[in-house]
Amino acid sequence: MRRTAFYLPTMKDTPAEAQIVSHRVMLRAGMVRQCSAGIYAWLPLGLKVLNNIARIVREEQDAAGCNEVLMPTIQSADLWRQSGRYDAYGPEMLRITDRHERDMLFGPTNEEMVTELFSRDVKSYKQLPLNLYHIQWKFRDEIRPRFGVMRGREFLMKDGYSFDVSKVAAAEAYKRVFISYLKTFKRMGLVAFPMKADTGPIGGDLSHEFLIEAKTGESEIFYDSALNDLDIFNTDTSDAAALDQAFQTLTAAYARTDETHEQGEFEAAVPELRRRTARGIEVGHIFYFGTKYSEPLGAKVTGPDGAEIDVHMGSYGIGVSRLVGGIIEASHDEQGVIWPAEIAPFHVGLVNIKVGHEGCDAGCQQLYDALRSKGVEVLYDDREERAGAKFADMELIGLPWVMTVGPRGAESGMVEVKNRKSGEKVEVAFDKGLELVMANAPRR
Ligand code: P5A
């Protein structure tokens, strides 16, 4: 993509309304613009990041055997009256009346709707287990929307729902998602801490939150440093015993610093030398709630003996739009974002120091074509603009690599290649430079 054709309205000044790094950077880097309190428009750069996150979430959900669907944002109030949540949910729910005076709402979550959908077509235990998920906008009328997309009123969530014949089978489904979430976050370059959690308005008796490490995070936690070396990704999740073993190890390795009973368990399980503290932001939350929704909404299957069984359910959320802010909180410096390769909106930034100079133009064109022909995403800054301003923008938007062609290098076929994360710069021949940046490039 050429910068002259790409809608990327960056800002030099720090917007006064933004209190945290990620919000400031997202505004300055032209990723989002606020439309109403807690409601944002996504501009091209931000949307590319959002889509990359959604793609990883989708790939990992599919790998875990979940089925993607797409349910509507607008729901009928009747379903929520059946479950008893219409009144219980309170002022966070945006209630809408249609032209026929029917009560509708903008969905804050989809337990009711998915249960009803399921019950229309699934009648036998033979059709289970099943996990249905979608990636869809939600609305919650938060009292204090703040920190940009981290706590919005309208936000993008991946919400999945599992259906099983028994509590034992449902617990297995829960653990499988648990492990798959850790993989999902790891692919985004994040370390995620699963913590026992309250169930709040979703309900149920088993729940974990997934926090990612960020200095500006809201909660403080303890964790076992040995977990950094643990290879949970080789867990055979089709084997119930192995799955349970991995789950038990992982859940014993974390504690909230403000929960004394958890601290006690943590200290019993983890030797002092391995104990660490960190701050975290919640990016995922999972629940097991048994028959809380299946009973009132009549989601039953017939078992092997012909008797009817209320299905056992769980629900599993990932804050897709929140992750954009969360990843920035976890990975930035004074100059701007440092995107992990899988998330970056482009893999390479290409800076033409002197647009209009024959050698610079030809050199950049050559690199641009070479990268594009290999499916590597590149943002080519071809504007007639000061080099300093171009570099500052590249640092701000945080692409993993920046390749720079100036008049001197162009003549000898040399390009400067800079790694955003390490800050290391090398001056190398074009083909060497291409080799370097392509080594860890996602191909799209
Ligand atoms: C699980 C999926 C649920 O809603 N029902 C369906 C369950 N859980 S949750 O914890 O309430 O939300 C899941 C994740 O969504 C993100 N999130 C938000 N992101 C941005 N702004 C908000 N106001 C907001 N509220 C929730 C979080 O990442 C949360 O973990």
Image (cartoon, helix red, strand yellow):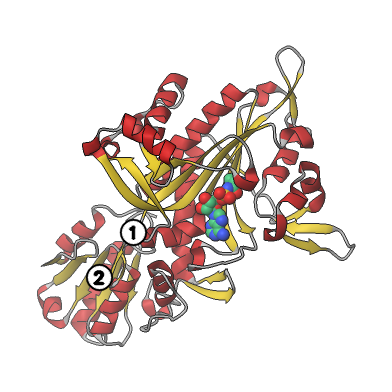
Count neighbours of disc 1 (C-alpha within 10 A) and say few if under 14, some if 14 to 19, many if 20 or more. Answer: some
Is residue 23 placed above or below 339 in the rendered structure?
below
Q: Quadrant of residue 291?
A: top right
Q: Amino acid at mark 2?
A: Gln
Q: Residue furthest left?
A: 412
- The quadrant in which residue 415 appears is bottom left
- Cβ at disc 1 under 8 Å from ligand 1: no
- The residue singled out by tag 1 in the image is 215
Counting the numbered discs, the total is 2
Q: What residue is rendered at 21% in x and 86% in y?
A: 357
Residue 189 seen in render: no
Question: How far apart are the alpha carbons under marks 2 and 1?
Answer: 41 Å
**What residue is drawn where x is 32% and y is 80%?**
382
Q: Check disc 2: other Cα within 10 Å, few if <14, some if 14-19, many if 20+.
A: few
Residue 2 at x, y percent in the picture = 37, 75
Q: Which residue is mark 2?
A: 366
**Residue furthest front in the image:** 260
The answer to whether the residues at label 2 and label 1 have Cβ atoms under 8 Å apart is no
Residue 135 visible in this rendered orientation of the protein: yes
Helix, strand or loop at label 1? It is loop
Please report the residue visible at 33 percent of the width from the left and 63 percent of the height from the top: 372
Identity, as a three-letter code, of the amino acid under mark 1: Lys
Q: Residue 344's image quarter?
A: bottom left
The foreground one among 411 and 142 is 142
Location of the N terminus (image quadrant): bottom left
